[in-house]
Amino acid sequence: MNRLWAPWRLQYIEHTPEEQGCIFCDKPARNRDAEDYILHRGERCFIMLNAFPYNNGHLLIAPYRHVPDLTDLDEDEQRDLLALTNLGLKALREVYHPQGFNVGINIGQVAGAGIADHIHLHIVPRWSGDTNFMPVLGETRVVPQALSESHERLREAIGMVTG
């Protein structure tokens, strides 16, 4: 049997409390952006790293307002969501040089929404060969960069893009 050593994950296993409430409401209100991996705050929406990423740089974009469906967003929220999606794509291209992206919204639990009560958009950077035997056979994803390092690099890139 092969072993994949990831000792930095022990802190996550031992110290990640069960989330209560809504992360998309609670984390922006805490104003601890580095700790909560919030990269950028727009007028009506914000960008944060996914704490359970499919790949390095997996972003989440959510409105501040707690609504479950895309059709519940007003026009200003829709504009901000799309503008921050473009900002996230630019920052990811600058930092990671992906060959493609998956961009999507899961509406409803049956559609795969892990947090179905608060609409959010995923941006997952993709590279040729980024899906290998690990997630298929081992049900394990290998994410080679710590979230704190991803946060620092992407926040810097967003600052460069927004000027």
Image (cartoon, helix red, strand yellow):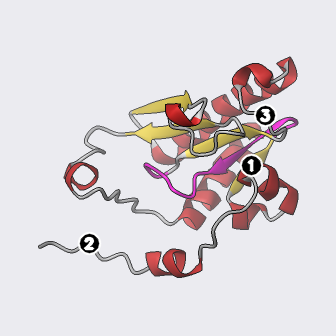
Q: What is the x, y in percent for residue 94?
A: 54, 42
Q: Residue at x 43, y 49 (%)?
A: 55
The reply, left or right, for residue 45 in relation to residue 152 is right
33 above or below 68?
A: below
Tell whether label 1 touches label 2 (CB within 8 Å). Answer: no
Using the rendered view, name the quadrant where residue 37 is placed. bottom right
Which element type, helix, strand or loop, lies under badge 1? helix
Q: Residues within 10 Å of mark 1 (few under 14, many from 20)?
A: many
Mark 1 or 3, nearer chain start:
1
Task: Using the numbered discs, state the Cα–Cα distance from disc 1 to disc 3 in whole angstroms.
Answer: 10 Å
Find the residue positioned furthest to the front.
110
Q: Residue at x 53, y 74 (%)?
A: 12
Q: Nearer the viewer's eye, disc 1 or disc 3?
A: 3
Magenta stretch: dominant secondary structure: loop
Residue that carries the numbered disc 3 in the rendered image: 67
Q: What is the x, y in percent for residue 163?
A: 78, 40
Residue that carries the numbered disc 2 in the rendered image: 4
Find the residue positioned furthest to the left.
1
Q: Nearer the viewer's eye, disc 2 or disc 1?
A: 1
User: Which kind of residue does numbered mark 1 sit on?
Assistant: Phe
Task: Using the numbered discs, state the Cα–Cα distance from disc 2 to disc 3 in whole angstroms.
Answer: 40 Å
Q: Nearer the viewer's eye, disc 2 or disc 3?
A: 3
Using the rendered view, name the quadrant where residue 153 is placed. bottom right
User: Which kind of residue does numbered mark 2 sit on?
Assistant: Leu
The reply, left or right, for residue 118 in relation to residue 54 is right
Q: Where are the magenta residues, as a range?
A: 42-56
Task: Using the numbered discs, state the Cα–Cα distance from disc 2 to disc 1 in whole angstroms.
Answer: 32 Å
Residue that carries the numbered disc 1 in the rendered image: 24
Residue 52 highlighted magenta (yes or no)? yes
Q: Residues within 10 Å of mark 2 (few under 14, many from 20)?
A: few
Q: What is the x, y in percent for residue 130?
A: 30, 45
Residue nearest the viewer, comparing 42 with 163: 42
